[in-house]
Image (cartoon, rainbow, N blue to C red):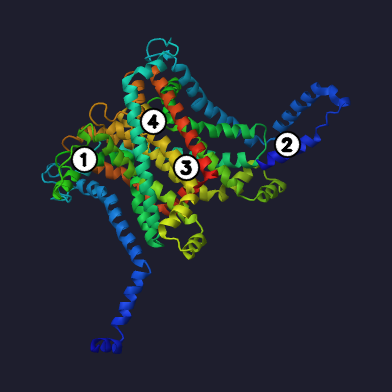
Amino acid sequence: MNDSQERSAVGGQALPRLSRAEAHSTLQLSARGRHGLWRRFRRASPFALIYSAAILIFYTIIFIIPFGTGIWLAFQNWDFITTPKFVGLRNFAKAFTDQYFWLALQKTVLFSVVEIAVGLTLALLFALALSQIFGKWQNIYLSLYYLPVITPLVVSIYLWRWLYRPTGGAINTLLSSVGLPEQPFLASSQQALWAITLVIIWAHLGTGIVLFLAGINDVPESLFEAARLDGAGFWQSFVRITLPLIRPVLVYQMVVSVIGTVQMFEAFFLMPGPGFSTRTLALYTYELGFRALNLGYGAAVSLIIFMLLLGATVFQLRRWRIEWEH
Amino acid sequence: MARNATFADTGRLPARNAAWRRWFISGRWAKTLTFLLLAAFSFAMFYPFFWLLFSSFKTGADIVRLPVSLLPEKWTLSAYRMVMDPTRANLPIAYVNSIIVTSGTVLSVLITSSMGGFIFARLEFPGRDYLFYFVLSTTMVPFLTLLIPLYIVMRELNLLNSLWGVWVPSIFSSFGVFLCRQFVYGIPRELYDAAKIDGSGDFGIYRNIILPLTKPILSALAIFVFLGAFNAYLWPLVILNDEEKLTLPLIIARMANRFGGTDYQAVMAGSVLVSIPPLIVFLIFQKNFVRGIALTGLKG
């Protein structure tokens, strides 16, 4: 960045100042500019140019063409077999009247909001508690909390499906042994979504703890010392010192978590509740594209997800930056 | 009075008493309490894994026995034999497939990211920053949006139902390029200039100077790429079809369909075997792990 600024500054000086006498040569100037560009290409190292070509080809195949195809597809009706038929905005209009789309959107938002709110709060609490412990034990606890993150999610899902069994499941055995009523969990359309949310919170908690702990450990100890001398308690120094200083971590976590939770697929695919009770937008897109073979509509729904996520990200960043400045 | 005097004489209980009081007043009791609470929670977090591990040593009759018990009645390896038997489950082949795809992805991402980091941070060529910001901007589009059209592109390229199709979309990683670029900015420019004056080519500088110096960030990146590639589910699910081409997460789901009804212990045994490679990587790179998360998370 710095280099290019320097370079353009030098270039700016080298350009003749456009006095009236010299203003005859806009043409010549542009020619000189093109010549400069060519020279810069020739002076650039072949290593950089080959790499750039490779990365450009890669993203053309993996990003530009699919993204373009996706947008094109959202205006078509296609089932892989017949020729695609242009339907205009009908796919998008369909989404707005499609009750399954709204249901899926509702489940997605519920899952995402609860997972992030509960997950990040828990992670922050754990990180705070861990920050009070030093040395070896901090690492040991950290590793234990991180194990579910390491474990392949598919493994966790089948493990929890086993624990959640209505009769003879480990959790119900535990509940009845302390005198609580047994629960249906995944078999109930009221509880299934929350049962899945709990699994994902469990599976992702470690990441949040590690990030928050890194943030807290970065806060200079002298700040806490000063606060203690001024008579601030634990809670006060948390609200006044820790929280503001780890806000970048918090914002990063929230933005990343929204993107992650909205795209969560395996959990709803492999551990579904009854009926539509746990069908989120990610699952809906997959089913539209690869089960119902309604590719156009599937592409439209996935574009809506893209726009929703973009909106959510921009909203969060702006909102938090405003508070940050304030 | 008399008792006090004796204790005062020996000087033991008051001293110990004072130690307890100091312990309480100093607030160190809060630390002890925190410690115990954390221990309890870590047990709760770990508890499901006990079920995973112990159930995998049960027999088919043992695992459905009521009331359930955590420990097997009789320890047996029959579940492991079941999933390693090529006629009943394709776990060994899936292991090979997963190792191929994962190592391919890790290698390619490490190479392309370190090269990209160096090139975008230090080399000059027209359009460099535009290209970099374009690469960065691709992360704004969620993978879910690209899922259906990318499948169509892969179909056109004849990469369906092959491990190539799983690998190709992850040759480059925009996140990795970004991370390495940030890291290369931290390497003194003088090193590059000195090597240049000594007559090294840019690839030579990358190979001999930049690559060794970016090792810390590369080892952190490697862990995340490994986990991401090894645990990937959705994209392999869409691309792969034949049983002998499936990766480990997919084979777990297949096994659950096959054994789930009657032989859940086989699913557990398969799960244990699938969890071992990430666990080994974690244990080996544990130090880099925590530092890596901090590096990648905070700079992102």
Q: Nearer the viewer, residue B145 or B72?
A: B145
Q: In the image, is A243 to the left or to the right of B89?
A: right
Q: Is residue B207 above or below residue B38?
A: above
Report crowding for label 1: few under 14, some 14 to 19, many 20 or more residues within 10 A (C-alpha). Answer: many
Q: Are marks 1 and 4 on the same chain?
A: no
Q: Residue at x 57, y 31 (%)?
A: B134
Q: Are marks 2 and 1 on the same chain?
A: yes
Pointer 2: what residue?
A8
Pointer 3: what residue?
A252
For the C terminus of chain A, which image quadrant? top right
Label 3 vs label 1: CA separation? 32 Å
Q: Which three-letter amino acid code belongs to the residue tagged 3? A: Tyr
Label 4 SS: helix
Label 2 vs label 4: CA separation? 44 Å
- 2 and 3 marks in contact (CB < 8 Å): no
Closer mark to the observer between disc 3 and disc 4: 3
Closer mark to the observer between disc 2 and disc 3: 3
Of all chains, the one bearing label 2 is A
Closer mark to the observer between disc 1 and disc 4: 1
Pointer 4: what residue?
B235
Q: Which three-letter amino acid code belongs to the residue tagged 2? A: Ser
Q: Nearer the viewer, residue B31 or A17?
A: B31
| The label number, if any, that marks residue A164 in the structure image | 1
Report crowding for label 3: few under 14, some 14 to 19, many 20 or more residues within 10 A (C-alpha). Answer: some
Where is residue A137 shown, x and y percent of the image? 37, 61
Where is residue B68 shown, x and y percent of the image? 14, 46
- 2 and 4 marks in contact (CB < 8 Å): no
Q: Residue at x 29, y 50 (%)?
A: B45
- 3 and 4 marks in contact (CB < 8 Å): no
Of all chains, the one bearing label 3 is A
Closer mark to the observer between disc 2 and disc 4: 2
Report crowding for label 4: few under 14, some 14 to 19, many 20 or more residues within 10 A (C-alpha). Answer: some
